[in-house]
Amino acid sequence: MSRAALLVLADGRFPAGGHAHSGGAEAAVGAGRVTGAASLEDFCRGRLHTAGLVSASLAAAAALGTDPVELDAAADARTPSPALRTAARRLGRQLTRAARAAWPSAELDALRRAFPKGAHQPVVLGVTARAAGLGPADAAYCAVYESVSGPATATVRLLGLDPFEATGVLARLAPEMDEVAGAAVCAAERAAGEGTDVLPADSAPLLEISAQAHAGWHMRLFAT
Amino acid sequence: MHLDHASPHDGPGAVGADALRPDGVRRALRIGLGGPVGSGKTATVAALCRALRDEASLAVVTNDIYTREDAEFLLRAAVLPPERIAAVETGACPHTAIRDDISANLEAVEDLEDEVGPLDLILVESGGDNLTATFSRGLVDAQIFVIDVAGGDDIPRKGGPGVTTADLLVVNKTDLAPYVGSDLTRMAADARAQRGRLPVVLQSLREEDGIRDVADWVRSRLAAWTA
Amino acid sequence: MNTAGVRAGARVVARADGRGGTCLPVLEGDGPLALRRTRGSGTGARVLLVGAMSGPLGGDRLTMRAEVGTGARLGVGSAAATLALPGRHTDDARYDVRLTVAPGGELHWLPEQLISVRGSSLLATTHADLARGARLVLREEQVLGRSGEPPGRLITRLTVRIAGRPVLDQQLTCGPGTRGGWDGPAVLGGHRAVGQLVVVRPEFDDEPVTARALGEGAAVLPLPGPAALVTAVAPDALRLRRLLDGAAHLLAPAPG
């Protein structure tokens, strides 16, 4: 296992399309729910324990070798917003492309054949981790970090928030990220024996509602 | 279904720039148009579509800062049927989408070829950005950099990757030069000094057939691509 | 100390009676769960869940089952809101609802609100298993605290399957001491009432529901199957019900 491979995969500059997404931050800023570092931290914390936990569990399960088709169906059921399902598949397709260039593998090729328009991004992330010689905890950490780093970076652009404050938010959330990644790995291990129904399904009503409103905005900077 | 390893498109290194599609057919030539905000990229794309649509199968990908504005301009101008125009969202970073992380643009060009293809030419228009924004060679085969006389006649002299290295430099809106006090002769000379043998076109789209030189350059690229 | 609370169950089975109507061969309940048949409308049967005790209290385990057979139509409501209350037992309370609908069957599961009272701790799960060709209208509403009161701990999980495939699986975790950010700008943003309306109709296969936002507090979301979810948040139970009722019209069969 290569620890450096984790840095390559987790790098915000990894070319897999994430830069065009705010993880709901643009909608929350637009609605006046995120106005500065404190509300950004609250936003990220809520996202971490809901969408972040669900993504991390799916990614860890895929990294353990759980059937990606079944995991993709589980991801669909856990993503009621069609705007977010579309975005997750688009990002999954973009990640598949980058991952196949970085870590060629038969499993990634098979995943692309099964989902030519993209599987849910966390599922692809887990399969990518396997291809990179990484484990379920690595996949979970990538998903957990993405769940909060995306909104933090976007908020810097949207509000002109001091980038040092945004980085401080991420640093303060680190212990909770550890907890969520740990919980995700436990859930993924359980799912290996008991099926994907036992994977976490934590939802964030405002993220789902505002994603649909945001999809209808005529002028926006981010895809989600 | 083809086997992944049997297709050159699926080789580990060839994720975007490969000349053949998975079915073995040559993909469309991809030409990028970049340049600062307001220099006339979208108008150039529209004029190219009108000039070339009867002789080649065309499509356009736009990269807007705010979603779909340029795409909607092209739709309203009806230069192409709507299914031939795709918009990519860039998350406030248009240069990232054409250079550092081209995955969304690659998907857009592939989807256009899958859904309306076969295509001869896809024009990829960047969002208006600064003078440093250039296209990745993984995304386009050639790029046109569009500046205009109103943006300042010292832009060619200052250089920058777009002005210096683009396969074609277009100095647009030459009809405005007398009004904005820009010296066209000096702009052309500075551009040639910066670019060595790379071509420069001075154009005004207000003139009858003002797109002719750029369209001819695209035609020669297309001929070389399909040769 | 006795940590075991009440264990109680209720069960209703609806079958087509062969004359175009619906009969209820099973209608039973004990403890805090009692079922009464009321006057149905048209060909369907209607049942009311009557709270014989206030419940669920800490340590209680309540299970409610409804089974709708081929061609049968059942509507289930409740006489009053369900209060999750703190009990003498330290364990969480649990309330499980299991719904099954056969092909051509139709279930309207429309209970009153679930109110999470200060100091309570409840895990409530609802699993609906539908055959292909079954119909469902399901509404759940969670109210966080009585008026002016902080809520207890509440975890709800709602799962809907059609022909074995999960089309919706979502959990809501809220209340003090549960998870960070539950009341923040990504999750509830200070709203005290949250609700879900799920509509499953085979016709959605051919005429999919259009996704739409209904203001800032609700959205109609087509699910991956012949189903749609309306998810809503509101400052209080009354405004939540208005949002969900308004959305229900959008998903109702076209008249005529």
Image: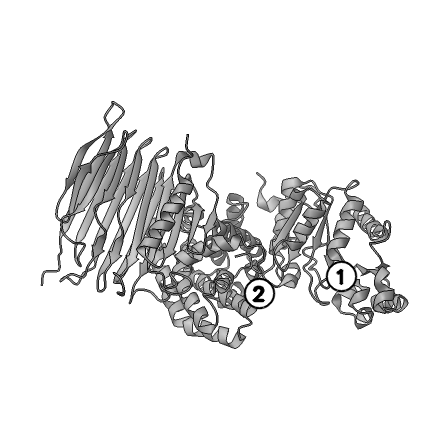
**In this figure, which residue is indicated by the disc labeled 2?**
A13
In this view, C171 is above or below A2: above
For the N terminus of chain B, give its image quadrant.
Answer: top right
State the mark number for residue A104. Answer: none
Within-10-Å neighbours for mark 2: few <14, some 14–19, many 20+: some
Task: Name the residue rendered at 34%, 57% in the picture.
Answer: A187
What is the x, y in percent for residue C43?
A: 27, 29
Q: Residue furthest left?
A: C1
Task: Name the residue rendered at 45%, 36% in the picture.
Answer: C205
**In this figure, which residue is indicated by the disc labeled 1?**
B39
Q: Chain of mark 2?
A: A
Q: Between marks 1 and 2, how big is the CA–CA gap? A: 29 Å
Q: Secondary structure at mark 2?
A: loop
What is the x, y in percent for residue C25?
A: 18, 32
What is the x, y in percent for residue B185?
A: 90, 67
Quadrant of the image occupied by residue B43: bottom right
Residue C241: in sight, yes or no? yes
